[in-house]
Amino acid sequence: MLKRLHHNAYRCRDSEETRKFYSDFLGLPLVNAFQISETKSGRATRTLHSFYQMEDGSSLAFFEAPDMPFTFKPQHDFDLHIALEVTQEDLQMMFAKGKAAGIETRGISDHGFIDSIYFRDPNGYVIELTAKREGHDEIVAAATETARQKLDEWQRTKPPAVAT
């Protein structure tokens, strides 16, 4: 039934600064942008919806909606991050490029089956670039065998949630 990701959509503060990060820095082509003048519920709006395409045809999309309240804040990795796959060579190149551009750049983190670097985009979202390590597919296949058991164990033993 579900085939693949078509796009994920996020809010952005400014479409041009978002384009500079996703197209100029990350290299994703801007493939569509259109203005929305009315929401599906009939409310008048003036919103731009833009799409940045990845090699597999899926896209990261953004809404710039100045007439709608939204609080932009630096996201914690555990709250929200967007992970995109690259080669090991591109991971090294993008790490150096991020540092040289003065963009917040963290890593290179060894996760055992992948290596990752992290940037923060102009909207506060964490962007992870990840490269498979040797043995990745075997590690993922083995993890699949025990994933449900680990989830069930977590449900039985997890700490209580912190009240907000």
Image (cartoon, helix red, strand yellow):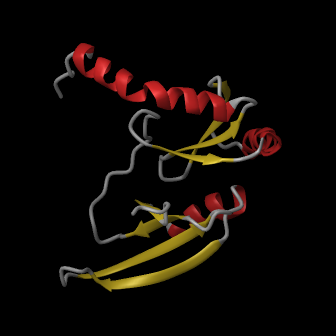
Residue 59 location (% of width, % of height)? 55, 65
Split into 4 quadrants, where in the image is the C terminus?
Answer: top left
Horizontal side, residue 155 vs residue 14: left or right: left
Residue 100 location (% of width, % of height)? 78, 42
Determine if residue 21 is in view.
yes
Residue 19 figure quarter:
bottom right
User: Which residue is found at the position 35% from the left and 70% from the top?
Assistant: 66
Horizontal side, residue 42 vs residue 77: left or right: left
User: Which residue is found at the position 40% from the left and 44% from the top?
Assistant: 73
Residue 116 location (% of width, % of height)? 65, 34
Horizontal side, residue 55 vs residue 16: left or right: right
Residue 117, placed above or below residue 50: above
| Depth check, front residue: 148 or 126 | 148
Residue 21 figure quarter:
bottom right
Determine if residue 106 is in view.
no
Residue 87 location (% of width, % of height)? 76, 45
| Depth check, front residue: 69 or 91 | 91
Split into 4 quadrants, where in the image is the N terminus?
Answer: bottom left
